[in-house]
Image: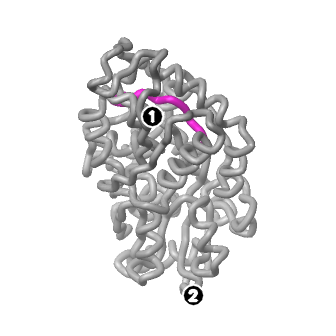
Amino acid sequence: MLTWKKITGVALTAALAISLAACSSDDSEGKASAPDYPKNNITLVAPSGAGGGWDLTARSIAKTMNDTKLIEKPITVENKPGGGGAVYMAEFATKEAKNDYVLMVKSPPILINNDKAEGNSPYGYKDTTPLAQLTRDYGAIVVKSDSEYKTLQDILDAIKKDPKTVTLAGGSAPGSMDHLVGILPAFEAGIDPKAVKYVSYDGGGEAVAALLGGNADVIATDASTIATYVKSGDVRVLAVSSSERLEGELADVPTYKESGIDAEFTIWRGIFGPKEMSEGAVNYWSEKLEKMVETDEWKAELEKNGWASEYRDAKDFASYLEDQDKVIVELLTALGMQK
């Protein structure tokens, strides 16, 4: 039986047997032997538009690695939006499956998109090589600063009265992470999740733009990425999905539980290599990431973005993903959205 008391990540993960392709000295497919890696520049993909959690995480990793010289080859970040991350996931799992020089930042949607029925992606975390979990974040329910809705309960009351009058938006596809963050309070309040009007955008930045442009009444997004807009006075955060109140710009924002919703939702973020990443490249990145999370430069990025550090190495991250995949399946099943 699914319990909604604590959906951590929708904190997801597991004992995954990672298949590592044998190292090859032939670099024609992006492969490299251990002594040679990295021979080329590296691309880190954020499978969304600019401004969201994946984009900020990818840029923080690249900046830290470049600034500290932990990795001497330049790391560039590319944004490849579409389908809440599902579009690029297909490319990463197939075209880039053997390319040691292309990596990807992802979070719970790598599980959700593969497990849900609507808009299902045939590719999931088992079509990658999990390298490390790096951060922990939370969901936030956000309105414009001049919104008529002052509390989370105000929104829930309006949805109960007439679901068509409230448009919820997010930076991920229906049934994916932002959608789940947004409908979790409605589900706990006894509202049919399918009755909630949800509009998806490619990334948190576009969802915020929709809110500010009057195309949405409320958005569900990452707590860390909304702090800048709170500081500028453009938005108000009505509730966060953490177990305790956050710090910084969101210190005065109540949690779901304080708002009468007995549930939590934790958003992890991690870095993934391609499915057939060479053993040499996996070992290289494992070593560099372990060192990166201890640097002052990385800690400064965490503080700047309002992220909590939560590091898991490749083995532990793979196990975590397997466990969390089971939680996601239960979650989607309860909502009638599982494949």
**Residue 264 seen by the camera:** yes
Q: The residue under label 2 is which amino acid type?
A: Asp
Query: Residue 183's image quarter?
Result: bottom left
Q: Earlier in the sequence, mark 1 or mark 2?
A: 2
State the SS at label 2.
loop
Tag 1 near tag 2, CB within 8 Å: no
Q: What crowding class fits label 1: few (fewer than 14 Cα within 10 Å), some (14-19), or many (20 or more)? A: many
Q: Is residue 234 above or below residue 264?
A: below
Image position, residue 218 (x, y; %): 48, 74
**Residue 323 seen by the camera:** no
Residue drawn at (66%, 58%) of the image: 257
Query: Residue 21's image quarter?
Result: top left
In the displayed structure, does residue 305 sit left or right of residue 200?
Answer: right
Q: How was the colour assigned to the protein in this rendering?
A: one colour
Image position, residue 212 (x, y; %): 47, 80
| Residue that carries the numbered disc 2 in the rendered image | 146
**Gap in Å between the C-alphas at discs 1 and 2?**
40 Å
Q: The residue under label 1 is which amino acid type?
A: Phe
Q: Is residue 86 above or below residue 16?
A: below
Q: Which residues are magenta?
A: 126-135
Q: Which mark is residue 272?
A: 1
Asked whether residue 37 is drawn in magenta, I would say no
Image position, residue 169 (x, y; %): 41, 68
Q: Main secondary structure of the magenta part?
A: strand
Residue drawn at (41%, 16%) of the image: 33
Q: Is residue 209 above or below residue 36?
A: below
Q: What crowding class fits label 2: few (fewer than 14 Cα within 10 Å), some (14-19), or many (20 or more)? A: few
In the displayed structure, does residue 33 sit left or right of residue 305?
Answer: left
